[in-house]
Each structure stands twice: as structure tokens, then as C-alpha cells.
Amino acid sequence: MPCDETLVATLSIPPVMTTGVREQFLDDLRTSLTNPSNTLTLECSAVEVVTSMHISLLWEARRACDDEGVALQLHHPTGAMRRVLRVMDLDTFFDVAGETESSNIRDSLPQDYSHGPDFEDRIVPTLDGVQESLARFIMFLADLAVTSDDAYQLQTAYYEIAANIVSHGNLRTDAMICVHAAAAPDHLVIEFRDNGQPFDPTAFRHCDDFRAAAKRGATRGLGIGMVHRLVDRMEYHSDDDMCNVVSITKKWSHPNE
Amino acid sequence: MNSPAVTERRINDDTMMLVASRTIETSNAHEVFVAITSARKQGFKYVVVDMSALDFISSAGVGALLGTVELLRADGGDLILANIPKPIHSVLEVLDLAEFFTTASSTEDAMAITRS
């Protein structure tokens, strides 16, 4: 029997995401998909600060809807969420409906991110902490109007350096990695400071032959070599407080060039 | 519980497809390595990695691909990367790997490569 009736279920994306909140949302999602509906809408208007867990949740919802043959729509995504989706090349992957009240992206920036060409962050020294910081850095990049390729390469370099410090810096659990990024018209400088074991990544410039790595069957130790390839300059020094300071510089092209 | 880094789909006796999740990084890259080497041990000559959903791959993920591609080639097969998102492709270009890996613009094209 043909049925053209549109049956819509609605869930709200939680603004603050924790493991417990995430599990509750996934339970609600499964319940919604067991009821007859051919469209699921996710209300996104409350999400001002987008974390990797939010993006992960959208993916899970998309996958679950695909499995059930249910269309998924994101309703009223905030400017911050739109920027993250755009930078991650996901803006065409999700069906987005409804504008937020502010049509000016800069106006809709969370207050923490309305700081012009500078970015400051403190990373909890865990891989989850790196992912959380990376999500904030992606939002910062989105406001700089760099090409998606440059943005992705910067985000990769950011992840690799931070993850390297977390994995090999032997930081105390209460320590933090401090990041400062300063944007100029044609380049970005990012500085990472930590109090972990001294490590000079510039000494590993030669480790960037990835085809040779494949011949060796190498699976690890590629991160710093990757950063050398992705950025224009990498420097290291230890300051007076025995703090490791790694800075990277990447020139960029603007999308309209 | 996190989603698996890749989901396996047996295509035929020669080919295993691995559908990548959205992120492959330090914490889950080993799953990719294990999935590819396991497919090889099961006798699959070709492993196709469908990257259409992938939005971030770290050096650990690239390492999982680099550490297995020559093993498959030594057996007369190959590792084929399909549907590589443009920003990720740009990184492979910078790393001089875009032409090192066998790539395909779709899973159908990847399957055609396995039959050629």
C-alpha cells in the first residue's frame, strides 16, 4: 500500500556532551528509530561549542538512520556548528534546515573564540583532550577563511604535535599543554609549550620519506616527519623554565586566490 | 564504546572492503592494521579501504596503510584507497604518497582495478 505520509521524529543535540549524556542520546535515538518515522530531525540550536563528541554523535545518528532507511535533518545549527561542518567538509553530507538567528558567522561565535587573529588553548594531556582542543582549533581556522586543504593540513599538524607531546612527553596528569596561535594575513604560527621530557622534533627532519617507510613496513614514528612536510617551518627551544617550546609556521592561500 | 575504525565487507574470494569510520588516529589506527593483515592471512589479495566517511586520519592511520601495502603487493595483490576526501588527498600529495598508493574515485572503480 503506497504511503506518502511524512512521519517525523525529533531529538535535540545536547549542548554539553559527556559520556553519560552521549549514551542517553544514543538510547533515545534507538528508541526513536524503532517508532514509525521516515525523517529524524536533530535540533542543534543549543550547541554553541562543538566538540569532537558532537561530531561523533552526528555520525552515529547518520549511520543509524541510513541503516533504518530514515532521512536525517539537522535543524537550526549554530554558526559554530556550521563552521565545524564546513571545515570538516561535512556541510554537504548532512541535510541542514533552518537558519540560526544570527546570519553573521562572526556574531555567532562563542565568546571564547571572538578574539581576532589569536587562538589560546590549554590541552588536557590525553588523546581525548587533544581531540577536544582540535575541535576548538578547527573553529578558529574556520574564521580565518583559509582553503579547506590548508585548514586540514594545519589541523593535522596541530594534532600530530599535541599527540606527540601527550604520548611521549611523560607529562604529569595535572599538567597542561599550552597553545598559542597567531594569524598573519598570509601565514599562521602555532606555539606549543609543555613541561614534559625535553624533545626536539626538528632533529627528526630526515624522517619524512614515507615511501621508504613503506618499504620498511614502518607503522609508527611518522608524525613528526608528517609535520615537517605539512608546514613551512618548525622550531624548538627550551626556555628558562625548562619548558619545551615547539613552534610551527605555515603559509597559506586564501580560498579566492 | 567507540565505533570500530573500520567495518569489514567481504566482496569476493579475492577482495575485502574496509569501510573507514570518520576518524582514524592514534587510539584506533591499530585496528586498521589488524584488519588489513587479517584479511591478507585469510587469503584476500586485495583490500579496498572506502574512505568516503573519513574526515581525519593521523600519522598513525597513514602508518597502518604504509605498513601493510607492500605485504599485499608482495602477494600479487594491492591496497586500494577509494573515495579519498579532497583534504586528505592533499595531505597524501604533500607526503608524496598520492601516487604511491593505488587510488580509486569510487568503490566501483576500485573493484574494476581488482579485476584488471
Image: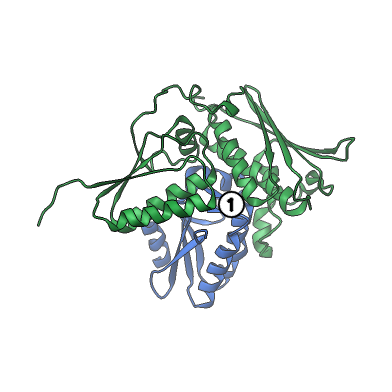
Residue named by callout 1:
B97
Q: Could you tell me which residue is drawn at 62 percent across and 23 percent down?
A: A115
Q: Name the residue nearer the viewer: A245 or B49.
A: A245
Q: Is residue A205 above or below residue B18?
A: above
Write down which chain is painted green: A
Q: Secondary structure at mark 1?
A: loop
Foreground pick, A71 / A152: A71
- What residue appears at the point 52 percent right and 47 percent down from the top-left corner? A53
Residue A215 vertical placement versus A192 (above, below) = below
> How many labels sit on residues?
1
Q: How is the image coloured?
A: by chain
Q: Position of residue B44 (x, y in %)?
A: 47, 74
The colour with which the image depicts chain B is blue
- Residue B28 locus on image (x, y percent): 58, 59
Residue type at mark 1: give it. Answer: Leu
Asked whether the viewer can see residue B114, the reply is: yes
Q: Is residue B105 something that shows in the picture?
A: no
* Residue at x 70% of width, y 43% of height: A228
Position of the N terminus of chain A by quadrant = bottom left
